[in-house]
Image (tube, grey):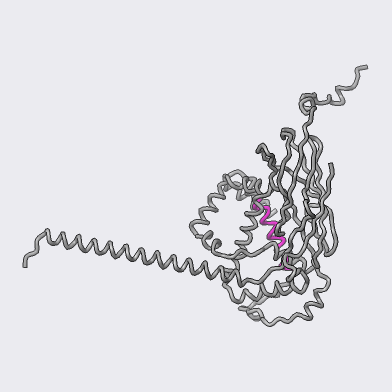
Amino acid sequence: MKQSSKINLADKDSACPRSTKNLLASLHSRLTILRYISGGEALGSIIAGMAKLGKEVSQTTEGLRLRNALESKHHTSNGRALWQKLRISDWLGNTIPSPVLDQLQNDVALVLSNDLHSELQAFTVYDRPTTCLTDDMGKIEIDYLDVTIGLWAYSRYFIRIIEDLASTSIETNTFKMDTIKKILI
Amino acid sequence: MKISNVQIKEQGKQSNQLSSLFKEMLNLQSEYQMRVSDESLRYLRRLQGIAAPATPGTVVIPKKGTLLSGSGSFGKPIEINLEIENIQKSYSYILPMLTPLISPSGVTWYAIADYLPANLLIPPNSSKSLRVILDVPSDLPSDVYHGSLTLEGFLKGALPVAVTIQKQKNVKQLAKKPAPKPLSKRRKKP
């Protein structure tokens, strides 16, 4: 039996709509704020954002299934022991979680927008990124596509590892070798 | 001057008491310092959160009284259709996920759902449709199951879902019905 419903996707804040100009300003302010916070705070904020997302997704059927599959495994108790001993949860618990999916959505929308070039022309950047390496010290050029493909490869690798961890039985040396072989192949 | 053993013991006791008192005081003081630094860090983080740059976001606005509903029974997949319109000036990306469905009698159904398409990229001021297809397990009791469809990354992104599983009279008969014979055995002997 088919039934259809309709929903709208609208701006969270009408004063700050998802226009190209605002998305650009949001990305720029995220980059600018990196100059005023420590690397640990920036990284912690991103990981805390992912943890928040993990908690939310654990309420869905797929998320719950994955969580249950991971829960009883040997590596989960190892991971939790590391978490406790290295006080990772203390570090992340005191950090403001970044809205990681919102930011990803906005960045995707920004690179897909048709008026980006005209907005970039009108946009003024006051800050210059600080660099540690100079050209003669082996500084390499990093392209937008390098990062995009790197993220894709990293995410694929990550997904395979997590799914393997969820499906594998505990004894671990064989698992590690199998996983590594699979990934390398 | 003579010092008796008793006197030495008493002096030792006193110095032990003093040192334990001193230790306790040090412990209390260091604990206090730890708490103060923890609390100040927390306070600073909260301030940092307030000062963090605003991120433009998306909200899901359902039409009044929207309830995603479907009905079916074992062997008949349930289909739920959803029309999504993006009224923003930018693209939106949708990744739907279903929560477990729960009946009033307390049965929880971890539905295996197919999302067609699995994800949607909706251009500004346009709309696309999403189909969610649920396979009904044979042993699922007939009832109305409630849950929600979440659109990850969107605030207020969960849409209520109600799925009615109808009674199927012939389920037992279907289960008892023997499997059809293989073709080779069905052939009549000459």
Q: How many marks?
A: 0
* Start-end of magenta stretch: A144-162
Q: Residue furthest right?
A: B190
Query: Could one spot residue A144 in this view of the protein?
Result: no
Chief SS of the magenta region: helix
Task: Quarter of the image for the N terminus of chain A: give it.
Answer: top right
Q: Nearer the viewer, residue A18 or A139?
A: A18
Q: Quadrant of residue A55?
A: bottom right
Where does residue B7 sit, x and y in percent of width and height? Answer: 12, 61
B72 lies above or below A41: above
Left or right of residue A36: residue B142: right
**Residue farthest to the front, as pictured:** B64
Q: Quadrant of residue B24?
A: bottom left
Compared across the picture, whether A20 is left or right of A63 comes to right
B34 drawn magenta: no
Q: Relative to residue A55, is residue A20 drawn left or right?
A: right
Which residue corresponds to the image point at 71% horizontal and 81% vertical from the top-left?
Answer: A125
Q: Is residue B21 above or below residue B165?
A: below
| Camera-side residue of A115 and B61 | B61
Residue lying furthest left in this view? B1
* Residue A153 shown in magenta: yes
Residue visible at 67% across and 36% down in the picture: B105
Residue B184 picture location, percent across and down: 87, 24
Across and down, in percent, residue B25 comes to 32, 65
- Confirm whether residue B49 shows in the render: yes
| Residue A78 placement (x, y as % from top left) | 53, 51
- In the image, residue B71 sits, relative to residue B94, either above or below, namely above
